[in-house]
Image (cartoon, helix red, strand yellow):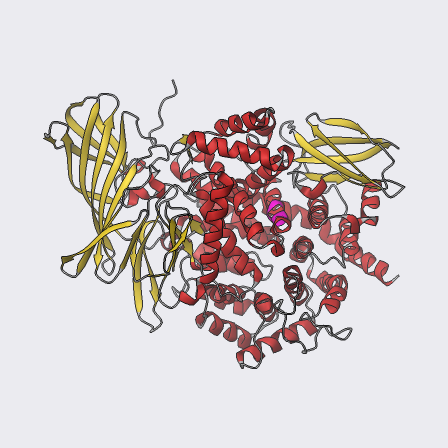
Amino acid sequence: MTERPPYRLPRDVVPEHYELVIEPDLPGATFVGAAGIDLRVLAATSDIVLNANELDINRAALVMADGRNVVPEVIYRPGEQQLCLRLPTPLLPGNCRLDLRFTGKLNELLRGFYRSKFKSPSGKEQWVASTQFESTDARRAFPCWDEPDFKATFGVTLVADDGLTALSNAREVSSELVGNGKRRTRFAKTIKMSTYLVAFIVGPFELTSPRVVDRVPMRIAYVPGRGALTALAERAAAHALSFLRNYFSMPYPADKLDHIAIPDFASGAMENVGLVTYRETALLVAEDSAQVERQRVVSTVAHETAHMWFGDLVTMRWWEGIWLNEAFATFMETLATDQFEPRWQIWDNFGVDRAAALATDGLRASRAIEHPVGRPEEADDMFDVITYDKGASVLRMIERYLGDETFRRGLNLYLDTHRFSNTDVTDLWDALESASGQPIRAAMSTWVDQPGHPLVSASLTGPFELTLSQRRFLLDGGAPDAEQTWAVPVSLRYGTAEGGVEHDQLLLQDVSTTVPLKAVPTWLVVNEEAWGVYRTYYSEDLRGRLLSSHTGLSNRERLSLVSDMWATTVAGLVSLPSSLEVWWTLRDDRDPDVWWAISSGLGLLDLISHEEDRQRLHSFVVALAGGLFDDLGWGPAIHPQGARGQGQRLGGNGASGESPQQARLRARLVTLLGTLGSDDAVRTEARKRLALADAGEAPLPPDLATAVAQVVASAGGDEEWSVLYCHYKDAATPQDEVRYLQSLGGFSNGALLSRSIELTFSGEVRNQDAPYLLMSILGKREGSVLAWEAIEAHWEEMQRRWPANSIHRMLEALPGLAGTSHAAADRALAWLDAHPLPRGELKLRQARERLKVNLAFRERIAPLLRAALEDALNQRER
């Protein structure tokens, strides 16, 4: 039998129901609490062990079934965040009740039970108290069995100043004044759930009127002054609840559903049962804001609503299974958002998330989707693109392989079988195998249980013969540490000389196989519609045929082509001129996500290029993107040829019937030309448009607002810094606040970047946002050394003030040091060796490896860059 690790709780006593009374003192940053916990004793024991962290226990008593009170000895185990209640005589199997009284602090670290500050419309500073318990911070708010499979029901009572709003997971059942200006609000008993899903919030919140969806009352909560920003979230929440209830053929499990925007929030959102918490930017948005901002709200609301079934109703047993929650919620958010607004073409945009996941998964420091988690703090590493985006991509791949109806039946069987309980991944495979009649477990284990993904190579070994092979793809270009294979669903599509199109499907399980073709292919796609979670390497012959027929590829296929070509170029498997050729071939492409992939490659070239070669790179960017932007223009109306810098047509938010993709494409090209392209005309026009908007003469189209801010910063001076800073301070919406704060990291002038770094540590920027401003500077060629010096100088302060999960996320920009020198990179790596972080070790290893990959790429490519760019430009002129 495996010995229980000391950080895991024993199983001899389990909770069945908690009665909690919590009274926060917002100005004093403290709270007092009481917990009455109904227990079931499974085995005789003298110790009751549960979790508590930074709580003072003022009273502990055990009420036996016969009414006797037993007072235990209270023993703190701070290293394991545990509380041991030692009894004078052994406790025998049966039922009893544990009564506890305790006090704690309302911290400002955005975890556990914390407080958050905001300014009312009148300018008065006000406090709210909110919770964030995932993964293991419920123990900071009340003593509990804080592991996901100790499910129980909860009854919550909040005592707070009269006039404040009090909310928890279940509906309110009573509210009464209790003296001293206090009001006691009691909530109904919850469903059986994990402690990390408990929530309670107190503050001067306002709420929309209840909207009943499938007999479930639903509201949006917000701080005063934000009410005008709730309409889209309300529609999105109603749609998501109805869509998911029908998809799962299962009613919503709780008695109400509130969505609340918290002024300070460490993550994007949190799926607490019946009371979902959000960053303001993820819930509150103007109806006429940019598509990407509206899409974020709709998709985040759908994601969190999906968790009510995947994660809340059915929960993973331990944290290595968190992907069962997050990958499914990501998959379901995309299904729901696509139905909410098909014009957004979100499944095409999903290709960007898939590409981002593959970029991390191409590192040796990647991990399996289901990765062992030991100590609770190791769970932080599980909240990443591997869990969310690779996991969701694998689910989409298997859904396409099985068919959507078969896949859906399997999910419904899984949820129905395990409702209100905890599962392992094998339970999911059982359900899918039962629904499909196929050996899902053997195939899916290759995707879930091992890190990395395959590179599938394709070449013609005869007129009618295609050879496919697989090996693990690594960005460093080296051989894998061990031989790996996957069960790769390959979907072929190829053209024939007669103009026909043929299709074929196979499961590539061996290292290589030969596929007979029905005709000699004039072009061939290996990963049709790019649903497969792998990269493709085409022989030079097949690549040439594919490029000559690129107009027949879908948006996702072209994105995959660009992404795969660039990844193999970084790995040294494909030459730089070959990637430049692909970019040049697609220079008229009108899909914004294809240009995202092109811009990402250009950004790395700008980072690692010699200073004297950057002007040539800028010229290449303008030659590549300038023609398409001249055709597209600053707005949807027809304009004279070559009007890139002209000021007519100040519209451009899709009001003229323009597609959302075209508006996004315009913003992408403005950003590319005005930053990496250093295009004077675009920069001049961006400054002009911002000035006209500030003067009240012409509003800045929402879809262009972020692009304009970034371009103005890129070549800006003192005046532009002050203008953008004022926009940040005077922001009318959460999106404007983030947009203009982030733009302050986009300057190229070192003195101005230093000013932005000072702002980061001034206390003026919210703790939830400060790490990400510093991150944007660390990732810049001009700012990386300045940012790193600031990180060293403020190392202890960052860990003391900022959310624990934000520091290792900020350090994901560490590869930006590849734009300086080996000495600067070595200094940072040595510092990190000497100053280990308590959390995020895996993410930090990945950032370090990516830095080394970038440095190796710089050594190999920088000396060749000028010649490659000149050749590409000369070919254009010819």
Q: Residue furthest left?
A: 68
Q: As rendered, which of 173 and 38 lies closer to the eye?
A: 173
Q: Can residue 777 be seen by looking at this rendering?
A: no
Above/below status of 609 relative to 712: above
In x, y percent, where is residue 706?
57, 66
Tell me the quarter of the image containing the C terminus: bottom right
Drawn side of residue 6 relative to residue 470, left or right: left
Magenta-colored segment: predominant secondary structure: helix
Drawn side of residue 279 relative to residue 639, left or right: left
Tell me the quarter of the image containing the N terminus: top left
Stretch of the chain drawn in magenta: 350-354
Q: In the image, is residue 431 part of the stretch drawn in magenta?
A: no
Above/below status of 434 relative to 702: above
Q: Residue furthest top?
A: 1
Picture quarter containing residue 226? bottom left
Above/below status of 368 relative to 697: above
Drawn side of residue 424 relative to residue 290, left or right: left
Q: Residue furthest front?
A: 215
Residue at the spot 69% in from the left edge and 40% down from the top edge: 535
In x, y percent, where is residue 851?
59, 47
Q: In the image, is residue 352 part of the stretch drawn in magenta?
A: yes
Q: As rendered, which of 343 and 743 lies closer to the eye?
A: 343
Residue at the spot 75% in from the left edge and 63% down from the top edge: 616
Drawn side of residue 442 relative to residue 807, left or right: right
